[in-house]
Image: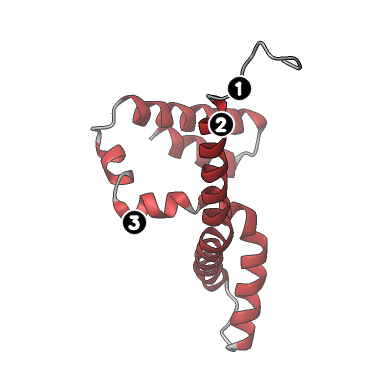
Amino acid sequence: MMMVIMYVGLIMVPSVYWHMGLSVSVSLLIASIWFDREQGLARFLARAPLVWLGTLTYAIYLLQTLAINLAQALLQKLHVPANFLAIVLAAYAVSVLVAWLAHVAIEQPAIDIARRLAAKRNIGQGSFNLSSPGF
């Protein structure tokens, strides 16, 4: 409830204090979820579709401008009136799609390469002699 109050306050009277209040209330919410994983919100956020979406959030963040531009071009191409709701829904759908493609084509292969390199390094660490010259 505190987050809603801070958000409404921020919209009604933009101020650094409302920003700080919103940041503090979101931080407290995150901490409460972290420390009590059995509460309703934590159980809701642990559902498979939301966990899957959570794996894409960084890619969505990185690609959101591209996705918005693609969504607007798509709406224009389909002759759909570009009202706010249509743009938001289309941009979100395109964001998720583009983020998923980036996750599958770039992120996952990079993570797999990093894991293989880390495994090789961990295996090779046993053969290092720290008393040898250069160390």
- Mark 3–mark 2 CB contact (< 8 Å): no
* Viewer-closest of 21 and 43: 43
**Image quarter of the N terminus:** top left
Q: Quadrant of residue 59?
A: bottom right
Residue closest to the far top: 131
At x 44%, y 49%, the residue is 54
Q: Which mark is residue 124?
A: 2
Q: Amino acid at mark 3?
A: Pro
Q: Residues within 10 Å of mark 3 (few under 14, many from 20)?
A: few
Q: Nearer the viewer, residue 115 or 63?
A: 115
Secondary structure beneath label 2: helix
Residue sitting at x 54%, y 69%: 94
Q: Earlier in the sequence, mark 3 or mark 2?
A: 3
The C terminus: image quadrant:
top right
User: In the rendering, at what x and y percent does residue 45 appear?
Assistant: 33, 45
Q: Residue furthest right?
A: 134
Seen at 62% across and 28% down, the residue is: 17
Count residues near mark 2 (Cα–Cα under 10 Å), then give few for <14, some for 14-19, many for 20+. Answer: few
The circle drawn on residue 49 is 3
Which of labels 3 and 2 is toward the front? Answer: 2
Residue 24 horizontal/vertical position (percent): 52, 26
Q: Amino acid at mark 2?
A: Gly
The numbered disc on residue 128 is 1
Q: Based on the displayed image, in which of its 4 quarters is residue 124 positioned? A: top right
Find the distance from the CA under tag 1 to the CA under tag 3: 45 Å
Q: Find the distance from the CA under tag 3 to the CA under tag 2.
A: 39 Å
- Check disc 1 and report its element: helix, strand or loop: loop
Residue 123 % position (x, y): 51, 32
Is the residue under label 2 in contact with that under label 1 (CB below 8 Å)?
yes
* 1 or 3: tag closer to the N-terminus: 3
